[in-house]
Amino acid sequence: MVSKETAARASVIGLSATRIGIGALAWIRPVTTARLFGMRGAAQAESAYLWRLFGVRDVVVGAATLRAPEDERLAWVALGLACDTADGAAAVVGRRDGSLPPSTAALVAAPAAAVGLGVWLLRAGLR
């Protein structure tokens, strides 16, 4: 049986790797990333710029979490949790004001899943 600590460490690695992968894709291929998230009208130059801002943030948070010493890793998980919470809130606002189409429900679900995992990791007290 896998211990809670082992599961927490594996979750940190998985969450960080996902963050780095999505962030890198957003920076390298912003239009492709926008389309993957259901944003068909995202081919404008301004949109690509914003996707790159998002992308570099996620790469940095993911890499910093992986590279952090054990006693600092929890702080990086909390910072990522704050980013994911803000992303989820932005998706809700976008759905309400009509700037995001209904097909982008994944924008709410993905950050919500990351928030749930982050809360679990914080509660587990990963050290």
Image (cartoon, helix red, strand yellow):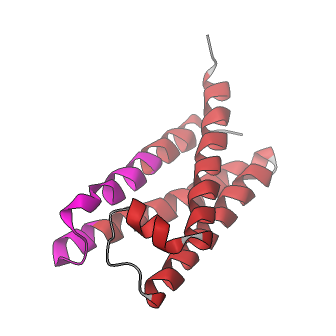
Q: In the picture provided, is 104 more to the left or to the right than 28?
A: left
List x then y, in percent, for residue 89: 33, 67
How many numbered callouts?
0
Nearer to me, 111 or 73: 111
List x then y, in percent, for residue 42: 38, 78
Q: In the picture provided, is 10 more to the left or to the right than 83?
A: right
Residue 110 belongs to the span the image colors magenta? yes
Q: Looking at the rendering, in which quadrant would you find the C terminus?
A: top right
What span is in magenta?
92-114
Name the image quarter holding residue 103.
bottom left
Q: In the picture provided, is 74 more to the left or to the right than 52?
A: right
At 46% from the left and 60% from the top, the residue drawn is: 84
Nearer to me, 125 or 109: 109
Residue 87 belongs to the span the image colors magenta? no
Q: Is residue 20 above or below residue 124?
A: below
At 62% from the left and 71% from the top, the residue drawn is: 28
Q: In this view of the protein, can residue 42 be seen by the observer? A: yes
Name the image quarter holding residue 4.
top right
At 66% from the left and 57% from the top, the residue drawn is: 62
At 41% from the left and 81% from the top, the residue drawn is: 43
Name the image quarter holding residue 3.
top right
Nearer to me, 1 or 58: 58
Q: Is residue 106 above or below residue 51?
A: above
Q: Looking at the rendering, in which quadrant would you find the N terminus?
A: top right
